[in-house]
Amino acid sequence: MVKSKIKFNDVSFANGTQKIQLPKYSSQVINLANGYSKATRPANVGQVSEDIKTFRDDETLTGYTNQDWINWHKNKYPEGIQKATDAAWDMFQKMVQSLNTVTKEDIQKWEEDFVFSKTYDGLMVQNAIIKKIAEEINTQNYRLASPEEERQGIDGYINDHPVQIKSDTYDRTGRLHNEEMQCAVISYKKGNKTIIFDYNPEDFQ
């Protein structure tokens, strides 16, 4: 087995694509405007990833270069890029107008929210889930784990039963450093505005 790597620039060179030049910092802002406005939604430019596969499978074509792809897409969606451009530009202008109202005090509020609230909430999600479960099973007997208990792999206790709270991307094994101790494992997934998790109330009886 040979392990290798390729630079992004080499990918572009191999595919014959061109790197565009934009004003400093503007690419990230344009990307946000594009996302907020849904400028590149399928109704405008098609389902691009699927269209590329269709393009590659088109046996009527004489070539499959990047320019061939551009021609193929423009033929199928003649107004697609213009529609996307208009939508993103409208949103970009709205964003610029809004950004012009931002003050230094607003920046300080953002920094405080990031350091004091969002990061804290992100790391303390275990506490919120343990408290929520305790409320749903109608018990006041719950707490976060002590530093020593955390070293054993325990995040907290509900009705004196140890529990692990793990992201759905974490290895869901329930293994503890103390092999004699049984532990419930609660997996959670973060959505846009909610945290979704499931548990068995019998684990805490």
Image: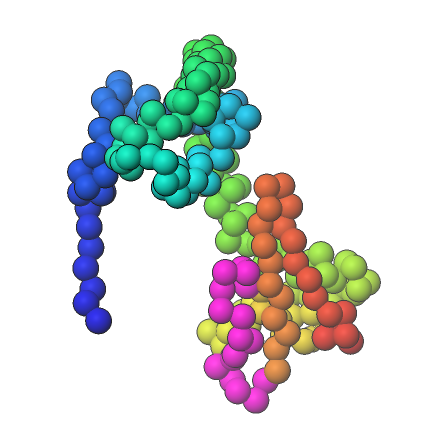
Whether the magenta-drawn stretch holds residue 17 is answered as no
| Quadrant placement of the N terminus | bottom left
| Labels in figure, total | 0
Q: Position of residue 59 (x, y in %)?
A: 37, 40
Is residue 22 shown left or right of residue 147? left
- Rendered view: 96 above or below 173: above
Could you say which is closer to the camera, residue 49 or residue 197?
Answer: 49
- Name which residue lies at 49% across and 64% down: 170
In this rendering, position of residue 122 left or right of residue 24:
right
Q: Quadrant of the C terminus?
A: bottom right
Q: Is residue 141 above or below residue 93?
A: below
Q: Which residues are magenta?
A: 166-181
The residue nearer to you, when weighing 126 against 39, is 39
Rendering coords of residue 48 (x, y %): 44, 35
Q: Position of residue 15 (x, y in %)?
A: 23, 39
What kind of colouring is applied to the model shown?
rainbow
Q: Is residue 101 visible?
A: no
Q: What residue is drawn where x is 50% and y is 53%?
A: 123
Magenta: main secondary structure equals loop
Report the residue at 60% width, 63% height from top.
Answer: 187
Q: Is residue 49 left or right of residue 61?
A: right
From this view, report whether residue 148 is shown above or below residue 29.
below
Q: Residue furthest front?
A: 60
Q: Which quarter of the figure has residue 64?
A: top left
Position of residue 141 measured from the top left corner of the image (x, y, whole percent): 73, 68
Residue lying furthest bottom in this view?
Answer: 180
Residue at image coords 72%, 75% = 203
Specify whether residue 169 is painted magenta. yes
Q: Is residue 62 visible?
A: yes
